[in-house]
Amino acid sequence: MLYVDIPTQPELMRLVGARGAAHVSFYLATSPETDKIQTSRIELGNLLRKAEAQLEAAGVAKRTIWPIGEQVNDLIDDDEFWKFQANGLAVFVTPESLATYRLPTHLESAVQVSDRFHLKPLIRAVSVPQHAFVLALAENEVRLIEFFSDMPAQEIRVPGMPRDAASAVGTANINSRSASGRIQGGEGQKVRLRQFARKVDAALRPVLSGRHEPLILAAADPLLSIFRSVNSYSDLVEEAIDRSPARVGSDELAALARPIMDARHAARLARLRDLFGARSSEGRATQDIAQAARAATFGAVDTLLVDIDEVIPGTVDDTTGAVSFADSPDAATYGVVDEIAGRVLANGGRVYGVRSADIPGGGALAAILRYAV
């Protein structure tokens, strides 16, 4: 597997619900290339000093600040940890704990200090489809390839995966003309290919069980359509790399798959923009931060698009959802839109971290409501 840690939904919800006197969120750019990682370690040290200064300015006790600094410095000094990185790193620290997530996303360096974690950049990694699998399927080979955007692809070893169609069905040649019931000629070839495809699907089940990343099929007919007919993975993508993957490298297959992923994401955003427009005429959509905060507090937001780059400091009342904006960030405030996103997730809504240009009207957020408020 690639060196990426995408948080599961339960992990994300634990981060959303975390509260305490001192919660520090670090985001920084990293690199899979070990010889370039020293810059990231230095940057994390610089961000730590900024966090400690904010905590001291807020009057947080030194006995609370000291464990945070100790844990981060221990991480900075952990040579083994820094050997295996991706494009970005998120670090969430309290006096009692430290959690890290290696992300495929390219991140800007940032630190946020508050009584809760800052999660919008992490939400983008969860909500935007950057991670997928390619199943390269041909009569003479089978490969499962994992890839992220802007990272090298990697072939995954799948226990029990048949080597090829002939060995999977126990014959020297699936195109044999010898007769055995229906197993002859073109019809016989299809029967054997279907047997082969079932064994491939069975081998994939333990590896993909419980996962929801897209699986893109690279194959030529008739094997392409045959595998679709026996596939049991719910997230097999309708679009395929419609060609034989034989003698095509993993990185080239990933390059062919990325436009499929981009098109799926663009289509999803287009559907959400259309839905936002339709719901606006019904009084069930808003771009107003204060209105979205109230709606999120009472569980009225079904889908939320948030700008991952902008941080609007302030607070949101726990009971009423009333927003108090601040002139500048400090340890007593947090990102208002970030807090709205957390409340939407806590109430079973969906949140997509995107760029401002992907939000209707280009604002900080766009909320599609379950009912008018």
Image (cartoon, grey):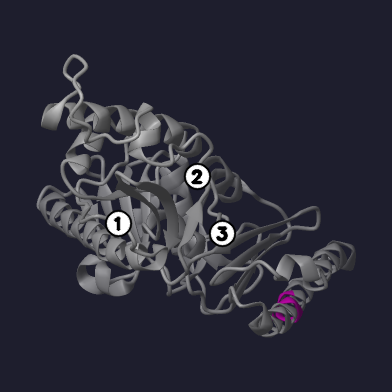
Does dot 2 land on a helix, a strand or a loop? loop
Q: Which residue is mark 3?
A: 4
Q: Write the residue at 31% across / 73% down.
A: 356
Which secondary structure class fits the magenta region best? Answer: helix
Give the Cα separation between the discs numbered 3 and 2: 37 Å
Residue type, mark 3 in image: Val
Q: Is residue 64 left or right of residue 363?
A: right
Q: Could you tell me residue 3's position as x and y percent?
A: 59, 61
Q: Is residue 354 left or right of residue 89?
A: left
Would you say residue 312 is visible in this rendering? yes
The residue lying furthest to the right in this view is 63
Residue type, mark 1 in image: Pro
Q: Residues within 10 Å of mark 2 (few under 14, many from 20)?
A: few
Residue type, mark 2 in image: Thr
The residue lying furthest to the front in this view is 178
Does dot 3 land on a helix, a strand or a loop? loop
Q: Which residue is mark 1?
A: 245
Of labels 3 and 1, earlier in sequence is 3
Q: Write the residue at 25% across / 65% down.
A: 259
Give the Cα separation between the discs numbered 2 and 1: 56 Å
Does dot 1 land on a helix, a strand or a loop? loop
Q: Residues within 10 Å of mark 1 (few under 14, many from 20)?
A: many
Q: Which residue is mark 2?
A: 319
What segment carries the magenta color? 47-51
In magenta stretch: residue 357: no
Q: Nearer the viewer, mark 3 or mark 2?
A: 3
Quadrant into which the C terminus falls: top left
Q: Write the residue at 29% across / 59% down.
A: 261
Quadrant into which the N terminus falls: bottom right
Q: Is residue 333 above or below residue 45?
A: above
Q: Nearer the viewer, mark 3 or mark 1?
A: 1
